[in-house]
Image (spheres, grey):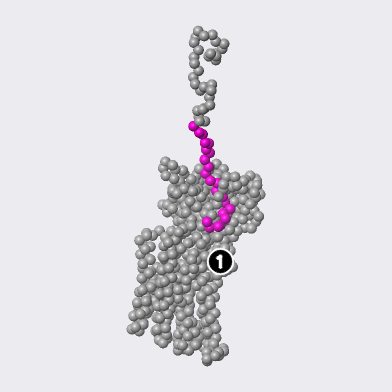
Amino acid sequence: MTQLALVIDLNVCVGCHACVTSCKEWNTSGTAGYLTDERPYGEDPTGTFFNRVQTFEVGEFPHTETVHFPKSCLHCEDPPCVPVCPTGASYKRPQDGIVLVDYDKCIGCKYCSWACPYGMREVDEHQKVMKKCTLCVDRIYDESLPPAERKPACVMACPTSARLFGDVHDPDSEVSVAIRERGGYGLMPEWGTKPANHYLPRQKTRITVHEDELVRADNPLKKERRQPRPDLSEPSLDDVTSW
Amino acid sequence: MHPAFSVIFLTTLSGVGQGLFLALFTGQVYSTVNVLPPQDPVRFYALGSLLALLFLGAALVASFFHLGRPERGWRAAAQWRTSWLSREVIVLPAFMGSVFVYGAIYYLGLNVPLVTVGGGVVISLGLVVGIVAAALCVALFVCTGMIYACIKFFQEWASPLTVINYFLLGTASGFTLATAFSIHTAPALVEFYGAWAVILTVAALGSRTASLIRNARIEYKSTVQTAIGVRHSRVVQKSQGFMGGSFNTREFFHHKSEGFVSLVKWSFLILVFPLPIALLGMGLASGDAPLLAGAFMVQYLGLIAERWFFFAQANHPQNLYYQTT
């Protein structure tokens, strides 16, 4: 079994929105049709996106931390949005675990969006069908692209490599190793949806330094002390002797 | 949740139609076992079925306004194995069809006796079709309720009370309409229907109050901490990734003040329960048809408010990602 997924490293995400714009650019130009933008330069702009970067503040000043939080479909291993679909337009691909919407079958009833606890599905106001992240399924299998570029557009765009892409069921893949070694976690585990996408937590590199490590307690030669200046009249062997 | 009027009208109108049919069928069962006098097949049963069909048809029309692509609506029957919405899409037309057949049997005088069982009870064709239609009617209530109750993320809805409320509120409004209808077409049944309308309304008050109490004490499973996976008692959203609105901010928020929601709640608590009961009581005592019709209209108006509140009260965990809306 293959389960393609993204692993998002919150430790290095700087919240630049490059993944958002790159996702929008790729997916609005694809064969499945554009991603609607309404009044993009008007007073109340709105539009369909597969990916957003949100910002949260953790803690209270001065002990605050800013967490930039990219948010796209998690391609759950037990996706609650799929069984509720009355038409079968919403489905999970058995071969790679990507959750997709068949835009030709969707009736736009929005029921699947109710059944997604993460709010990852959006109705396209022009095509009147439900849309969501496809993991760039039209890109990752495109053999006309060089192998290094067969990755989702958001992964290609990330300047800090905060987005990793791969098979989370392969224990030796880059993503599985990252999840295992860096404590990758899924969102809202209380619902049992088993999200395939994982997030890597923020990490601080700290070393513990004790007081007695700064000043040597055991220092018989008094190394740190200023050496007594030899009298000028004293004979000297070289510049360092002082006895 | 943003309460969509298409769904509000779909569920309330369908509830009235279903309740009215169950009222006709109950009257028929009672007269089969000779507890109530038999009624005119055309004026009562056929006309009553037509009235129920009108409500169900209006509900069906309302449902199409909820779809982005109504021309593909037929596809919604495909996933009946897993989706309650799909099951409703199958059961609603099946129920409408059986009500049509039921009414047609009476209208065309085809209500032939099939067998006579002990005590001179005659099982007629109309009764058999009625049993099928009544089963479909109850199935439709279950489907409609389960559409909401099966989504565990709406903790306000994920309860058997949701299905019970849909059943009791639908039958209460249907029996109230049957009371107002029977004063013109079957005067012998007015008190029977009136009594049942009051009983069902009181029962609905009980179950709806139970769900209000339950929802007031709800403890949400998801928190902003589990939503982003950061363990800290103070996590504040500073940006939701865009400055204008999106589907997420429109679909899952009612954008009304607390006061307005509270006003709707108290309106429906008065309009659905005590006021129709009082009007029914006065109408039954005086035999005044407009009072009974008024009872139904007030209750229906109240049910629209009830359904609006039902949607507005539901809080989706995705709202944790859109706290600055």
Q: Which residues are the magenta region?
A: A190-211
Q: Position of residue B195 (x, y in %)?
A: 40, 81
- Residue that carries the numbered disc 1 in the rendered image: B83
Q: Can the viewer see residue B185 in this picture?
A: no
Q: Can the viewer see residue B269 in this picture?
A: yes
Q: Position of residue A183 (x, y in %)?
A: 57, 47
Q: Position of residue B58 (x, y in %)?
A: 46, 73
The chain under label 1 reads B
In the image, taking residue A41 as reference, residue A150 lies left or right, namely: right
Q: Residue furthest bottom?
A: B120
Q: Residue at x 53, y 38 (%)?
A: A205
Q: Residue at x 48, y 61 (%)?
A: B154
Number of numbered discs visible in the structure rendering:
1
Q: Position of residue B299 (x, y in %)?
A: 39, 73
The answer to whether B87 is drawn above or below residue B179 in the figure is: above
Q: Residue at x 37, y 69 (%)?
A: B269
Judge the density around disc 1: few (<14), some (14-19), many (≥20) Cα neighbours within 10 Å: many
Q: Residue at x 54, y 8 (%)?
A: A235
Q: Name the foreground residue: B30 vs B111.
A: B30
Q: Name the foreground residue: B70 vs B263.
A: B263
Dominant secondary structure of the residues highlighted in magenta in the image: loop
- The quarter of the image holding the N terminus of chain A is bottom right
**Circle 1 sits in a helix, a strand or a loop, which is it?**
loop
Q: Name the foreground residue: B246 vs B142.
A: B142
Q: Label 1 amino acid?
A: Ser
* Residue B20 falls inside the magenta stretch: no
